[in-house]
Image: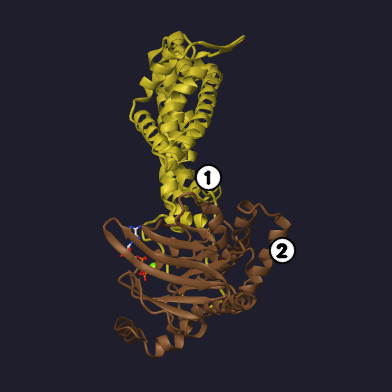
């Protein structure tokens, strides 16, 4: 019994559990029988062709989009429960979008501070101190007072990451956060995410950056036709994909 | 406007200067010409009146100067009415505009219906309804609140203003990209917080020019209240003409009132255009 507990702890308890999830928009099925388990401290990458439902899956995980079938559990909270406290769920789940979506009328620091102050009702002084630290962590100490319009895409994306982290989430979702960036700025953002992953943040990462996925991921999943087909360790995934479809996709992108 | 600044070697989009002469020079010249034109017409009509008036009696200029303070007072009353009905109309209109984008159909549909109804009704008809349907006092238990005619006029004018503000607010809210809603939602902001702290502050910028435009239109429309017997600038001017019974004064006298409205509304229109240009560039 005790041994088992220790082993469980070393593995980390599951933070996100997706079981048999189906999602359809009208008659159009985007996700079919999706299964995915992410344990505490793990980094999971999801790759797959455009339109295969990667963004939809992330949006389902923090209840921005309701699922049609199956179940999703995040930090012990049943996401598909009709009585779900959505706000409580979203405090535990940070999400960063491809288009940054910073609040353009607020400075970088205000962007980071807003949610903890107004949603978590934390004290301004505390929040400010933490936000300053978070901006330093993403390498933007010198940009506190810059408005989003004054920042490059990569800088905006790092502010967006800091903004999500300010809520102290249990899991971070990244939806192609580098897709809109040029190679130079891409790197700053990827480094930020890698640091997060190595510090033990639980991350689910949708990305087209194969090299990056191979480097940071504990598991790589492949979506196509609404099905996650490959959950092996990443080296195996990239080296010798079991599924023909994965092989075909990787041959195209690598 | 803030320009994007970065210390990273990224390419900035090139923005070509506008081809049309939308700089300050052209509109400023046009504006000055317009003002001069109106002044010349006014002076000419006054000169004609002065020359053609009966020799025995006061000259046109003397009469005009005699009535000027009263007409100006009346005009100030128009402004007071315009400010108060704009304030009332805006307060109500903002609530209806927000109602129009509510996820709840029970809120959205009545807000939409009321907006459409009052936006497409003639202002004078609404004013008549307000004048004749509202009681002249409301008794709340022992206290009786009097409803003098000018208060009813304010309410009557505020109705179409509210409907137009409602549309302006709805359009402004809709113009904010859905990503703003989504990221606020993902950060666990409630819908109300999102609206008041994130969406509306951004939308205000886009709502300001049409709102100012509406105000200028309302200010000119306040002369409608003279039809329902309130002593505004137009009523005073008409009374002056009746009292003097000098037909040749009609043109300069009304022009005097027009000039007052013009002097007030034209700068607002110019400011509106300037704001529109600025926000347009900002995108
Ligand atoms: N709200 C919606 N209503 C209807 N269809 C939708 C909606 N959202 C997404 N879809 C459809 O679901 C499918 C999957 O979309 P999704 O954005 O999840 O794909 P993706 O894998 O993230 O693609 P990409 O790599 O291009 O971002 C697409 O065909 C899309 O058109
Ligand atoms: Mg996507």
Q: Which residue is mark 2?
A: A129
| Residue depicted at x 48% and y 22% | B155
What residue is drawn where x is 45% and y is 50%? A82
Q: Residue furthest right?
A: A125
Q: Which residue is mark 1?
A: B192
- Count the marks: 2
Q: Secondary structure at mark 2?
A: helix
Numbered label attached to residue B75: none
Answer whether residue B5 is visible to the viewer in this image. Answer: no
**Residue toward you, B78 or A22:** A22
Q: Secondary structure at mark 1?
A: helix
Res. A230 in view: yes
Please state the quadrant of the image where ligand 2 appears. bottom left
Pick out the residue farthest to the bottom.
A239
Q: Residues within 10 Å of mark 1 (few under 14, many from 20)?
A: few
Q: Residue at x 38, y 30 (%)?
A: B114
Q: Choose between A137 and A85: the one closer to the eye.
A: A85
Q: Which chain did the renderer colour yellow?
A: B
Which chain did the image draw in brown?
Answer: A
Instruction: Find residue B141 and report its horizontal and vertical position in percent.
Output: 59, 11
């Amino acid at each position: 019994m005790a041994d088992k507990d220790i082993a469980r702890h070393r593995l980390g308890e599951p933070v996100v559990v997706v079981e048999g999830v189906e999602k359809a928009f009208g008659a159009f099925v985007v996700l079919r029988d999706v299964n995915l388990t992410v344990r505490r401290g793990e980094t999971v990458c999801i790759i797959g062709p455009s339109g295969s439902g990667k963004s939809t899956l992330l949006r389902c995980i923090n209840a921005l989009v309701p699922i049609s079938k199956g179940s999703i559990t995040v930090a012990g909270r049943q996401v598909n429960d009709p009585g779900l406290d959505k706000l409580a769920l979203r405090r535990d789940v940070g999400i960063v979008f491809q288009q940054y979506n910073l609040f353009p009328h607020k400075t970088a620091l205000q962007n980071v501070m807003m949610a903890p102050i107004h949603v978590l009702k934390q004290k301004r002084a505390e929040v400010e101190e933490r936000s300053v630290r978070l901006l330093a962590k993403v390498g933007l100490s010198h940009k506190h007072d810059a408005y989003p319009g004054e920042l490059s895409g990569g800088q905006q994306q790092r502010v967006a990451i800091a903004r999500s982290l300010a809520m102290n989430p249990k899991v971070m979702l990244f939806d192609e956060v580098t897709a809109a960036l040029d190679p130079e700025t891409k790197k700053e953002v990827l480094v930020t995410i890698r640091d997060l992953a190595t510090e033990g943040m639980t991350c689910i990462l949708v990305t087209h950056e194969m090299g990056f996925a191979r480097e940071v991921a504990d598991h790589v999943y492949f979506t196509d036709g609404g099905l996650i087909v490959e959950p092996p360790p990443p080296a195996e995934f990239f080296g010798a994909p079991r599924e023909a479809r994965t092989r075909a996709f990787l041959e195209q992108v690598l | 406007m803030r320009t994007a600044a970065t210390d990273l070697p990224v390419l900035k989009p090139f923005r070509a200067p506008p081809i049309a002469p939308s700089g300050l020079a052209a509109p400023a010249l046009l504006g000055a010409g317009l003002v001069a034109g109106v002044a010349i017409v006014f002076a000419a009509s006054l000169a004609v009146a002065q020359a053609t008036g009966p020799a025995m009696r006061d000259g046109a200029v003397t009469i005009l100067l005699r009535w000027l303070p009263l007409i100006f007072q009346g005009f100030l009353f128009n402004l007071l009415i315009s400010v108060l009905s704009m304030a009332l109309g805006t307060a109500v209109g903002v609530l209806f505009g927000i109602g129009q984008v509510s996820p709840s159909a029970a809120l959205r549909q009545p807000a939409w219906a009321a907006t459409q109804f009052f936006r497409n009704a003639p202002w004078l008809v609404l004013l008549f309804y307000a004048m004749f349907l509202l009681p002249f006092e409301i008794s709340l238990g022992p206290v009786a609140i009097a409803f003098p005619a000018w208060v009813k006029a304010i309410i009557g004018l505020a109705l179409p203003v509210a409907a137009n503000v409602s549309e302006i607010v709805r359009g402004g809210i809709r113009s904010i990209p859905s990503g703003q809603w989504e990221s606020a939602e993902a950060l666990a902001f409630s819908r109300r917080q999102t609206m008041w702290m994130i969406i509306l502050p951004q939308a205000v910028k886009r709502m300001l020019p049409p709102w100012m435009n509406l105000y200028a239109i309302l200010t000119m429309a306040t002369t409608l209240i003279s039809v329902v017997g309130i002593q505004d600038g137009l009523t005073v001017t008409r009374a002056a003409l009746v009292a003097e019974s000098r037909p040749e004064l009609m043109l300069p006298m009304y022009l005097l009132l027009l000039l007052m409205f013009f002097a007030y509304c034209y700068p607002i229109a110019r400011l509106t255009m300037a704001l529109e240009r600025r926000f347009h560039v900002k995108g």
